[in-house]
Image: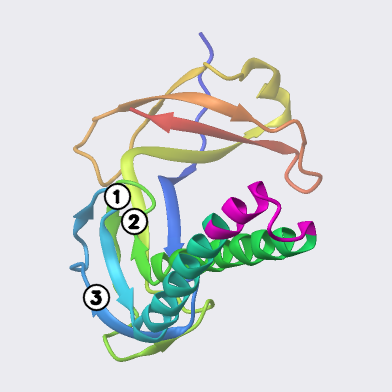
Amino acid sequence: SETLLVVGTLAANESAEIRPEVNGLVRLIAFEEGARVSKGDLLAKIDDSELRAQLAQAEARFQLAEVNIGRTQSLSESNSISRSELDRVRTEFATARAELALLRLRVEKTELRAPFDGVVGSRTLSAGDYVNTQSVLTVIHDLSRLKIDFQVPERFISKVAPGTRFGVRSKALAAGERVEGEVYFVSSVIDRQTRSSEVKGLLE
């Protein structure tokens, strides 16, 4: 067998910055820094009082449009109203339904939830802060497995492919301890400066 020693960089399986999708005041921070969270867990809540009021109006308009379309269709069956009037009421109903769905979605977006199981980092915001879509609340990392990124010299790259096994040693581990991993990506490009290719693997 041939052995090649290279230096690699570890990273979480997945990492994501948690940002709000709507502007507003932070009303609640629902996580502890460094805690483990599950996919769908509430991380923060943005004030939605104005949106709730708009949602109530939209629900009332939708209910009225629903009643109107039922009544209008009954009249249409007996030829008591014109086709254009029926079309107008149908349009109003469709518009009210779309507006209601949009506001429900906007209210839902005031809740920031974990996109996957992981560990949250430090938080950069507090309750009472005003946020926009560029604000970063925290970062979440999936540490269920780790990825490692390393460079393989051009002359060895033909011997590395997805499925190739490798071992990792680190000063952070006990002396002589070795963690096994497997390559899942080999770049098809050779860097002109280093004459090597990027390789990525997953650690068990």
Q: Nearer the viewer, residue 150 or 187?
A: 187
Q: Which residue is mark 1?
A: 118
How are the colours assigned in the image?
rainbow
- The quadrant in which residue 167 appears is top left
Disc 1 residue type (three-letter): Gly
Label 2's element?
loop
Which residue in the rendered view is the most extreme toward the right?
192
Whether residue 75 is visible here, answered yes or no, is yes
Q: Kindly check if marks 2 and 1 are in contact, taking CB atoms under 8 A apart as contact.
A: yes
Q: Residues within 10 Å of mark 1 (few under 14, many from 20)?
A: many
Q: Quadrant of residue 45?
A: bottom left
User: Residue shown at 53%/55% (left/top)?
Assistant: 70
Query: What range of the chain is rendered magenta?
Result: 71-83
Q: Which residue is mark 3?
A: 29
**Foreground of the two, 109 or 134:** 109
Q: CA distance from mark 1 to mark 3?
A: 17 Å
Image position, residue 112 (x, y; %): 36, 66
Measured in 3D between alpha carbons, the distance from the residue under mark 2 to the one under mark 1, in whole angstroms, is: 8 Å
Q: Residue 114, labelled with which disc?
A: 2
**Predominant SS along the magenta part:** helix
Question: Image point 45% across, 81% down: which residue?
Answer: 54
